[in-house]
């Protein structure tokens, strides 16, 4: 499941930035999804982690997809709207922790 | 062979949400199912028929959109079951038409790979091809056709382009004797979804060149509409203008209709010779039909103004944005993010709202949404609210663009919304704690609403409203007239005739129950048929007051109420209608959707209780303030 991680990541600059969780990103951040991992240890999503992973994948949150955070909600910056390749998706931060993004240097 | 003649070939439309399946279905079959620019419009299976140019009859299924056959919510389960032939009494479709938004192919390509595993013969409809062309998107159709191994048709469903070709391709595919492969579909694992994505990405890279002029408008509009502060302010302003407009824009045409109804009633009343058959036919027509049904018909302009706004927002693509802006507040009340659109649809009518809750995966989240949906102010409350506000609230300007009556209307809508949030928070705290399910929602690209389709939808709304008046209100008003006219008063009776009728006696018998909330017996009589539908109460008040007072003019029900009710009673009636479950059809749908009389009873019980408490408080506060 980490196979896409092994894919060549381009130049050294991007390889240097460590991946960040989508749930922690700010509006304007952009990068490439490097991992969708079941890791929502302490959060209760009402579904199990494997199910959350599959839902994210089916919506297009998949390794290799280009992602940009477009908007944040007023209260606590939640939810967030992201551009995911050619489509726009809204999601809550609590459900976004499993998506790891390697940010483009600004 | 003979079987093929007897039974139309079966075609299922399958694809991601909001790709134009229903628009295509309507274009193919001449149906008028709801089309709108957000995901999750269609929540049930709809069937329609057509004859192809080649003379073959087809049965077409419109299905809810889905990202995967691995269904999670009740609406997606319908799609999965239809495709796999698991619906009771239904075989698999003979042909699957995969409907794709040509400008957004990545996810649908993965779904198509799943559909291929199911093995039914397939045609790919690349819809929204007008937008693809405008963007300068280049798709190698021949290459894609060979890669996917299925015919491809480009379509513009809203303009009926490519629809004939699609029917022909389906026909040709059946005629060529294409047979289904063995169904090897099973729920994909995470790893399988990933590899399907890689495959889809490869296909996309090979056959699709990115657009030369990608859509930049959506991004620019979103920068304003999704702005954390400005976005919320615009949403509030929009709602405010909408509810004000229900009052101000609709006022003049509504007055004109009212005058027209009154005039027509007087003319027809005049045609009947005085005292003919004891005056009964004249009373039935003038009091029962004109004063009763007519008092509801005058609200057609208000209903249309409301729908005008809703249709524009839906077609433009604003609904998902509103859901985004309100998500935190909804989440705070324990509502699932996907509850927003069902609740917003409930402004039109709770019935489609409750059905739209099928897009919510988890039973509890869905149940909470269903239970609070009827608290949203549906369009059937408009006649009640408008009548009472018109009668009791002065028509005064209280600020720039602010009309006091419109302000009260806005307040009533706000009261409905707040009580829905509070009730759902209570349900969450008391009955079921635990997490809310994950919430992912596509934000569709904005589209300019087409004037024809807005007009068509408005006409459809007008037709629904008028046919309700004919099917429900009219027969009920005949009944109300009968029970308020018979039995006739005895010789030498001193009280008004209606006091001796069944309605008068029943109303006066039950009225003590409602005395604490300030209702008089006429109101109680109106509430009873009002359980059939909210606006029936207005019609019933019209009839009861008209029968009770033969001298007064038809129409002008508001003026009559203003004379005979106190302000406190009027306000109490408004409070009652914020909460009361005065709609049999809604209760029927709740029973069907929850499959439980228990939940239906819970809804009825909590709403009646809230209505009584709210009216009680309103009445007594108003009386204490001197409005008794
Ligand atoms: N420009 C353009 N707009 C289209 C076309 N087809 C559909 N639309 C618009 O796309 C939106 C979605 O159409 P629907 O038919 O409701 O989509 P659906 O696939 O049935 O959606 P769900 O029922 O939610 O899954 C509406 O706003 C339509 O007016 C098309 O070919 N061209
Ligand atoms: Mg649809």
Image (spheres, rainbow, N blue to C red):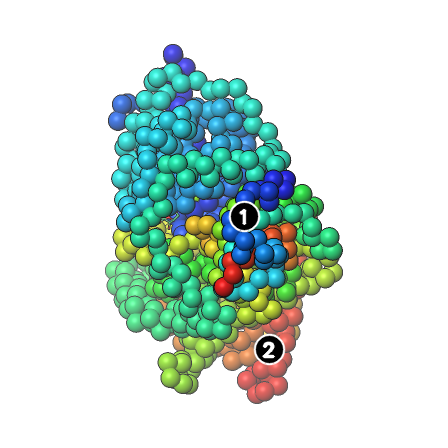
Q: Toward which corner of the image does residue B195 lie, by quadrant?
A: top right
User: Residue visible at 60% across and 45% down?
Assistant: A5
User: Residue visible at 60% across and 33% down?
Assistant: B187
Name the mark on residue A9: 1
Q: CA distance from mark 1 to mark 2?
A: 70 Å
Position above or below: B467 against B174: below
**Seen from this angle, which residue lies furthest front?**
A12
Left or right: B99 as drawn, with respect to B603? left
Position above or below: B190 against B181: below
Give the quadrant of ligand 2: top left
Which residue, given by chain and number where applicable, does mark 2 sit on? B619
Q: Position of residue B156 (x, y in %)?
A: 30, 42
User: Residue visible at 58% across and 64% down?
Assistant: A78
Comparing B274 with B590, the one in front is B590
For the N terminus of chain B, the quadrant is top left
**Seen from this angle, which residue lies furthest top?**
B1
Position above or below: B503 against B409: above
User: Residue visible at 61% across and 62% down?
Assistant: A24
């Amino acid at each position: 499941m980490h196979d896409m991680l092994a894919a060549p990541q381009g130049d050294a600059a991007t390889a240097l930035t460590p991946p960040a969780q989508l749930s922690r990103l700010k509006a304007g951040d952009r990068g490439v999804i490097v991992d969708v991992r079941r890791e929502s240890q302490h959060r209760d999503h009402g579904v199990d982690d494997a199910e959350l992973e599959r839902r994210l994948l089916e919506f297009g949150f998949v390794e290799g997809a280009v992602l940009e955070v477009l908007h944040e909600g007023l209260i606590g910056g939640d939810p967030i709207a992201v551009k995911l390749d050619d489509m726009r998706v809204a999601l809550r931060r609590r459900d976004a922790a499993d998506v790891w993004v390697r940010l483009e240097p600004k | 062979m003979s079987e093929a003649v007897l039974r139309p070939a079966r075609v299922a439309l399958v694809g991601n949400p909001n790709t134009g399946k229903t628009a295509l279905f309507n274009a193919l079959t001449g149906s008028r199912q709801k089309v709108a620019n957000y995901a999750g419009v269609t929540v049930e299976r709809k069937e329609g028929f057509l004859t192809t140019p080649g003379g073959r009859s087809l049965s077409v299924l419109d299905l809810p959109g889905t990202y995967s056959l691995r269904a999670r919510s009740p609406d997606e389960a319908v799609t999965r079951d239809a495709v796999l032939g698991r619906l009771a009494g239904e075989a698999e479709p003979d042909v699957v038409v995969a409907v794709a938004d040509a400008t957004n192919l990545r996810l649908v390509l993965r779904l198509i790979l799943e559909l291929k595993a199911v093995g039914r013969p397939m045609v790919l409809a690349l819809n929204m091809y007008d937008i693809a062309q405008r963007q300068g998107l280049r798709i190698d159709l021949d290459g894609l056709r060979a890669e996917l191994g299925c015919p491809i048709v480009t379509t513009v469903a809203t303009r009926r382009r490519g629809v004939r070709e699609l029917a022909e391709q389906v026909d040709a595919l059946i005629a060529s004797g294409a047979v289904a492969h063995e169904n090897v579909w099973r729920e994909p694992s995470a790893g399988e979804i990933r590899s399907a994505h890689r495959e889809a990405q490869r296909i996309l890279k090979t056959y699709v060149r990115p657009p030369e002029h990608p859509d930049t408008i959506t991004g620019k509009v979103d920068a304003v509409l999704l702005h954390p502060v400005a976005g919320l302010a615009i949403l509030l302003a929009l709602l405010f203008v909408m509810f004000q407009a229900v009052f101000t824009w609709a006022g003049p045409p509504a007055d004109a209709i009212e005058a027209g109804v009154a005039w027509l009633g007087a003319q027809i009343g005049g045609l009947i010779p005085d005292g003919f058959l004891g005056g009964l036919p004249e009373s039935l027509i003038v009091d029962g039909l004109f004063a009763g049904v007519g008092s509801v018909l005058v609200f057609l302009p208000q209903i249309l103004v409301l729908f005008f706004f809703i249709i524009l927002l839906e077609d433009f693509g604003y609904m998902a944005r509103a859901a985004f802006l309100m998500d935190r507040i909804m989440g705070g009340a324990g509502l699932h993010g996907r509850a927003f659109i069902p609740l917003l649809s409930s402004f039109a009518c709770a019935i489609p709202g409750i059905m739209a809750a099928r897009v919510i995966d988890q039973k509890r989240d869905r149940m909470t949404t269903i239970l609070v949906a009827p608290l949203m102010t549906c369009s059937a409350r408009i006649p009640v609210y408008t009548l009472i506000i018109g009668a009791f609230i002065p028509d005064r300007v209280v600020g720039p663009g602010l009309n006091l009556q419109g302000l009260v209307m806005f307040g009533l809508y706000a009261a409905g919304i707040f009580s829905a949030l509070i009730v759902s928070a209570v349900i969450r705290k008391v009955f079921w704690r635990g997490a809310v399910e994950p919430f992912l929602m596509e934000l569709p690209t904005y589209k300019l609403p087409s004037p024809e389709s807005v007009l068509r939808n408005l006409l459809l709304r007008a037709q629904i409203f008028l046919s309700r008046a004919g099917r429900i209100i009219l027969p009920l008003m005949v009944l109300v007239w009968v029970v308020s006219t018979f039995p006739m008063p005895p010789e030498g009776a001193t009280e008004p005739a209606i006091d001796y009728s069944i309605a008068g006696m029943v109303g006066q018998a039950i009225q003590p129950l409602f005395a604490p909330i300030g209702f008089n017996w006429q109101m109680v009589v109106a509430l009873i048929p009002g359980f059939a539908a909210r606006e029936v109460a207005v019609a019933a008040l019209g009839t009861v007051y008209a029968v009770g007072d033969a001298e007064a003019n038809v129409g002008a029900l508001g003026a009559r109420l203003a004379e005979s009710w106190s302000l406190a009673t009027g306000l109490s009636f408004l409070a009652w209608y914020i909460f009361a479950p005065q709609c049999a059809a809604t209760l029927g749908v709740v029973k069907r959707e929850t499959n439980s009389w228990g939940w239906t009873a819970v809804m009825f019980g909590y709403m009646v209780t809230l209505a009584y408490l709210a009216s009680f408080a309103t009445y007594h506060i108003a009386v204490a303030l001197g409005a008794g």
